[in-house]
Amino acid sequence: MRMKLSVKHTVDQWFNKIAKNPALGVTVSILWLMAIGWIAFGWNLGNIGLIDETEPLFAEASRQMFVTGDWITPFFNGETRFDKPALIYWCQAIAYAIIGVNEWAVRLPSAIAAFALVCLAFYTIYWYLGKQDELEQVSRPTRRYLISFIAAALMALNPETIIWARTGVSDMLLTACMASALLCFFVGYAGKEGTGEEFSQTRREATSLFPNKWYLAFYVLIAGAILTKGPVGIVLPGIIVGAFLLYVGKVREVLREMHLFVGILLIIVLSVPWYALVIWRNGWNYINSFFGYHNLERFTEVVNGHSAPWYFYFLVVLLGFAPYSVYLPASIVRLKFWQRSHWRSVERFQQFGLFAWFWFASIFSFFCIAVTKLPSYVLPLMPAAAILVALLWSDLFPNIENENDTEKVLENLSSSPRLPVPASLVWSGWVNVVFLSFLATALFNITHILGTDPAISNFHELIQKSGLPIIAGAIWLVCAVLVAGLLLSRRWNYVISINLIGFVAFIIFVLTPASFFIDRERQLPLRELSAIVLEAKQPDEELIMLGFKKPSVVFYSHIHVNYLGFPQEAIDHIKKQAAKGLKPASVLLLAEQKKFLQMDLQPDDYKNLSTKGAYNLVRVPFKKKKNEKMDIS
């Protein structure tokens, strides 16, 4: 017991020193954020090739903007691409201009957006805990720093965030804009109450044409979200903020102080011009494609076969926020959000947990209602989940008057009973043990769970030989044992740390090697074939891709690709091209080996240029064939 107290005494002293030296506190915070940011978002970010099929679509559309100078209409493979608005393409094109056209530039906007969000969340939580100490007239620097550190780590180090922060698509940029806007709203909202300078500032803002800086940031970030993914960028934050204000009974009051009319004008000025230009240039084609198909139909109908059962997002949150997701029920129950009279009576800043709950529940409910379902849709609720779990852990710190009185703290802790822990947290801890055990078992047997990959013929055998399933299972099994030991010894504070350390180990020893393995087996053959296409292609020679669509070939080869689905379709197309008497009198054909064999070409009908992985690259000349099936003269 004495040893445990001495450790706590040392930790408290260290954080007290940080609290007394603001420069040291800022330095330590920056170092912490940079460390978790590099592990989660920066490490090997651009050392892995683009992943088919979505990422190369964005990368190539951005490259076209960069090359052509057309910053209004996105294009891919010679056709307009109206799936998403322009902000992500602009960011990637700017990155191309700075560091060149490469994988780092494709993914850098997503990584920077994720890192900026984590930094803002760290500041917000530290600010909230400081306001709480101020209200209770206590000083708890250990609690302020540790919970802020934990919240930032939870937000960065979870599967859903890491996947999309390392992928060059629009989802992470949308999440960063939306979540940052919500954090800015709450700081602006909660900062309206206070004393001294805060009251003076509030009085000045009341007579000003513009709202405070946090509300202004809220409006700017909403405009960014609209330019990233369209109407959902304002609809979701609007639902969250509106439901929260309605619940706490402050709708009119807050809308007045937000200068809503000015805010809407600001959003329109920042976001509408690009939409006006792209509609002016493309007319109803854009309106029907983007607003109709990619927004309205995705919500009301199944698009691209992305249907799922009603419980789909329960599984996504469970696995996407693993292993901390098991603490979400206790984090939500802790709030007692159903006690409306209580929440309406507390000061604004004290409603932070309630706001995070509305944030989480609104996004979760919205996409459960939507008919089209994808795992990335609930990415914007992950920051709220991290905040909820971090606030749960903040309850485990003793409510002492002053952490600076360390001798008094040690005396009180040694003579008093243990800090009471909510039963919901105890049960969550044991669910954590069970979950980690199941996770370890699943990873040990992952080859029996994963499906096949047509691009990797011996996929299961290669995975097993890599040893990654054993390493992954061992990491989480050790974590399960350690968490169980901490629960039995009632060292609650360290449980979340074991989960975080386990996840970092999982990133380093499993996820990163697995990413390189999949890239080598699945994507590298396509990059190598793209390089061969660049060397072998004759001027104006057509490239046909048969039986599959891999947009990465367009990005890496920088040429137009004609996608054909079936062997007979390819044969008919080659006949038509031959009949036109085109020069050069040949086409390049990139096909899966199975589809290629189904074309029934004779050895003198084509010239094999290369075979990589599951793919063949051949040149088919336009000449008379003895075989009538391939008579393309």
Image: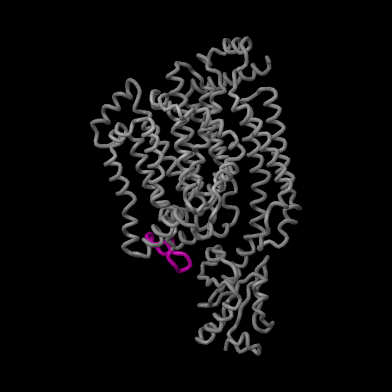
Q: Which colour scheme is used?
A: one colour
Image position of 424 (left or right of 77): right
Look at the picture and state if 526 lies above or below 400. below
Q: Can residue 42 be seen in this view?
A: no
Task: Name the one closer to the observer, 143 or 565.
Answer: 565
Q: Is residue 46 magenta?
A: no
Q: In the rendering, at what x and y percent does residue 242 appear?
A: 37, 38
Q: In the rendering, at what x and y percent does residue 606 appear?
A: 64, 81
The region drawn magenta spans 66-80
- Residue drawn at x 45%, y 38% is 359
Look at the picture and state if 185 lies above or below 581. above
Which image quarter is the C terminus in? bottom right
Which image quarter is the N terminus in? top right
Query: Quadrant of residue 190 in the image?
Result: top left
Q: Is residue 72 magenta?
A: yes
- Residue drawn at x 56%, y 66% is 549
- Residue drawn at x 44%, y 30% is 352
Q: In the rendering, at what x and y percent does residue 590 appear?
A: 60, 72
Task: Name the one closer to the observer, 405 or 537.
Answer: 405
Image position of 122 (left or right of 412): left
Q: Can residue 21 be seen in this view?
A: yes
Look at the picture and state if 615 lies above or below 626. above
Q: In the rendering, at what x and y percent does residue 47 appear?
A: 60, 53
Query: Quadrant of residue 409 in the image?
Result: top right
